[in-house]
Every structure is written in C-alpha cells, then in structure tokens.
Amino acid sequence: MEMKRLSGILLHPTSFPGSHGIGDLGQSAYQFIDFLVQAKQGLWQILPLGPTGYGDSPYASFSSFAGNPLLINLDKLMEAGDLEASDLADLPPFSQDKVDYGWVIHWKLPLLEKAARNFIANGSAERKAAYKTFLKENADWLDDFSLFMAVKEYFDKKSQEEEVPGAMWSNYWDEDIRLRKKSAMKQWRKKKAKSIEIKNVLQFYFFQQWGELKQYANDRDIQIIGDIPIFVASDSVDVWANREIFYLNSKGQPTVVAGVPPDYFSATGQLWGNPLYNWKALQKTNFTWWIKRIKAMLNMVDIVRIDHFRGFEAYWEVQADAENAIDGKWIKVPGHELFEAIKKALGDVPIIAEDLGIITKEVTALRDDFDFPGMKILQFAFDSNESGLNADNPFLPHNHVPNSVVYTGTHDNDTTLGWYKHRTDVEKDVIRRYIGRSDNDIVWVFMQMAMSSVARWAVIPLQDAFKLGSDARMNTPSLLGNNWAWRYQHADLTESTIWMLRDLVEFFGRLPRVPDDE
C-alpha cells in the first residue's frame, strides 16, 4: 500500500457532540471534518460502524454489512420531511459527556421508525427511486439482515415477557426459522413485512448520510480508515445466514469460540466468545464471504484496518463452555491463500494489519508478504520497565519502520495522560530518561514522538489531542459496562488544539494535499 507521510485522528462517530444523546452523522460530524482540515490532518480513523447489541460494543455487531441506525441524524430526516419539528421538541435531558445507550435507544428508535413510516407513505418519487436502487444494490446482505432483525425483535420481546435471560437466535428462536427452513422464511417475511421495510429504510438513511459525509471528507483530502473485526458476534445475521462457514452444533450454537491467551490486557486471557470460522468450508467457496465483506467495507471507507490480524495466521481456540481463555490452543489458518484470493478479486486492497499481541515470525511474514503496514503503540514501548528499558522493544520510536502506523494509544488503551499517571515511579523515570526532558507535558511529548517517527502514518486519539485523563477512556477490555460512551463538546475543538496539531504536522513532514484556497 502506497503511503504518503500523513497524520490523523482516531474518533468514533458516537463521540460527536449534540443534543440527541449520542454522536451522529449530522452537523457535528461535518464540523469535525472541518477541524481535521484546519489542523492539516489527512486521516480519520473510526471503529466499526455496524449496529451494536449487548454491551454496546462496535466489535459485537448484529451485522458485518449493515450500519448502526443510532448514528442517523434526526435533523436531516426533519429537513427531508420525514419528521416534524414537534417530533424533536420533547428532548430528554441527555448527558453531554457520555452516551447512555439504553436511554438513547428508548427515545431515538421510535422516532427513526416514525420517520421511516412517513417516508414509505409520503416520500418523493426521486427519493423512492434512490431507495429502490439502494435495495437492489444491497439485496445480497440487506434481505437477510432486515428479516433477522425483525424476527429478533419479535423473539426478544417474547423472551422479556417470559423472563428468559440471554435469549439469542440459536437458543430461543423456533426451530424452523432458526434453521432457515424455506417455509418459515417465507412465512416470517410475510408476517413481518412492515417491520422489514422499516429496517430497510433505516439502512437507506444510514448509508445515504454516511455516503454524504464520506464524500465531504474525501473532497477535502481526508481519507477514512475503517475497522473490520476479524470475528463476528454469535447473535448476528452473519452467523444465522452463513452457518456452514462456522463451527456450530445442530442448533446453531458455537462448539468452540475465539479469544486470546493471557496478555497485556488480562492475566487470564480474553474470552471473546465469538464463533470460529470453518476455514475448510471457506476455502471451498474461494473465500467468497470474506471477499464480499472486504468489498462492502471499501464502499464505506478508504482504508481498512483489520482487527486481530494475527488470527489470519493462527487463532486461539477455546471450548465454548470454558470459563476463561487460559486453556486454549493455536489453530492454523490459510491466511496467505485468503489474501491472495482477495487480491485477485479486488486488487491491491489498502489494509492496515493490527499486529498486536502474541506475534510470531509467521504472522510477520504474512503481513510483510502482502506489504501491509503494521501498528506501533507508544504506550507499549514503556510498559513493564521496572528493570530498565528494553532497547529492542519494537514499539520504541528508534525501532519503528516506515511501513507502519504509529499511535500514542488505541481505543483499548487508557488515554496517554491516564496511562502515565498509573506508571510506577521507576517506569516514569525510565520514560523521562528516554525522552530526555521533564514530564510536565507528557501527552505532548508522546504526540511529538508519534509525529516524528519514521512510520509513514501517525494517528492520535482525539482524547490525547485534548490531553484528557482516564475519564475519557473509550474502552477497557474485559470490563463489561461503561465502555464506548465518551463524548466531547463543541467548545473542545479549540484554536490552540488546531495550531498544536498543525505545528506537529508541518515540523515532521506530514502535510496532506490541501485545496487551493486553504
């Protein structure tokens, strides 16, 4: 992948400011793009955009292809005539600092569904034509997705009435629709026709709004880095509609699940619980499902970051009934064959390999064979330095390579300020000796190290650009609850932040191409 020296900001759209309880694709999103342009940034990295389920994690979506309806901007629907001003008049007192997903869902989804019904009944001929085109172009995944969500809605309500916890398609739905019998599929499509159409419209809304925002960013020389989780959620249309490519029992429940062995984030490993791919079955199809997934992603973003890239060389397999991820085993994957098939079908795909965790020479070879840039996390360069600095640590700036992307931290890390405050005195002393200065403004120093690195791309979480503490952390792995909720405020996009980022970009040769009038 050809990489001009650039820098960018990591920020998920849910973190945008606004009065509707959650960041969305409205005015604040465009103001953020303007901020990137003013700060001379060339990249915007996001997390997965799919509809989220239990735990609100964008890495546990109901679909690898669909968009999250909660990101749809309601003001734009009002401007289009699908909602009236009175619909948005009775606004709950949402927190401006955090997303309360339960409250947002309770308030926003009924409004989205009302807008969809109004569109179905009264949408203009021009918009209806665009909608029909959308349905045709996306039928390959949309038909199954909207049916899945409509049926799921029915059984979720039933499980709540019957007080059945943890109800999913594989352990609660009626057998005929769980196993996708033709008669049941036909029956449920007819039974839930209205609900299915509403869900189709919501996807139309999402992709229309996202497409307009992406075009706005691209027109200003901002490239968007998207994110593909290697694994999918058990309770997803991906698994329900493609049972043959996963290790499942006759009921559709996983027999083995994904995770990682003990690592930086957890002493007992991470038991993710995602169903694992049957790679032999995928090979027989020439990896069709993966090719479709990558292609769909490239229609939404410019560059694809693949989360847990090492899982394409070998993955950590854990029995489905295990309590933690300690007792697992590595299983080999035909990753080279997969990426050859992707390249043959789609050409040279711009991929960033999230090559963190337990990385072997085989994983490195797979990454390098396809010239994928890896990731360098500065916080990882200075962890566990009680006995002094390990000069060979690949995350230290002097060990970086050009074909890589450097980060101060990621969505799974604490903010740099919060991380530093939790270092021991010995670790802090090692850091001060390495940087050759005091730690009075440690966040700025880390941003400077990232920007000055030989790594061609540097990405800074917006929380670090604002120099925020642990309260602004996006996610704490293995901790359920209070994640994915951080939001900033309009006033936080200050001139001083803009000029600080511009100075770093100009000093270290990361200027993007800019419009002539800039």
Image (cartoon, grey):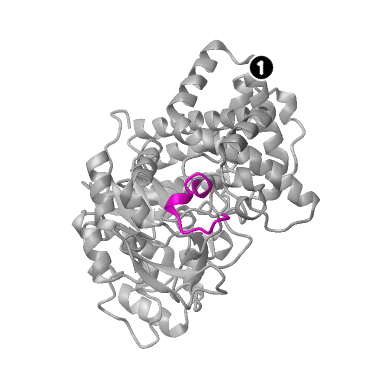
Q: Quadrant of residue 212?
A: top left
Q: In the image, is residue 182 part of the stretch drawn in magenta?
A: no
Residue farthest to the top, as pictured? 125
- The residue at 63%/61% (across/down) is 481
Amino acid at pointer 1: Ala
The local secondary structure at tag 1 comes to helix
Q: Quadrant of residue 366?
A: bottom left
What x and y, as percent, mark residue 276?
45, 60
- The residue at 74%/45% (across/down) is 157
Mark 1 surroundings: few (<14), some (14-19) or many (≥20) residues within 10 A: few
User: Tag count in the figure?
Assistant: 1
The residue under label 1 is: 121
Is residue 46 visible in the rendered structure shown here? yes
Q: Is residue 141 above or below residue 423?
A: above
- Quadrant in the picture for the C terminus: top left
Q: Nearer the viewer, residue 127 or 235?
A: 235
Highlighted range, magenta? 238-251
Q: Nearer the viewer, residue 143 or 123?
A: 143
What x and y, as percent, mark residue 50?
51, 44
Tell whether 313 sits left or right of 174: left
Tell whether 413 sits left or right of 109: left
Q: Is residue 74 above or below residue 227?
A: above
- The residue at 64%/24% (across/down) is 78
Q: In the image, is residue 245 part of the stretch drawn in magenta?
A: yes
Q: Is residue 108 above or below residue 434?
A: above
Is residue 47 visible in the rendered structure shown here? no
Tell whether 311 sits left or right of 328: left
Tell whether 410 sits left or right of 484: left
What x and y, as percent, mark residue 9?
41, 50
- The residue at 45%/33% (across/down) is 140
What x and y, as percent, mark residue 280?
34, 56
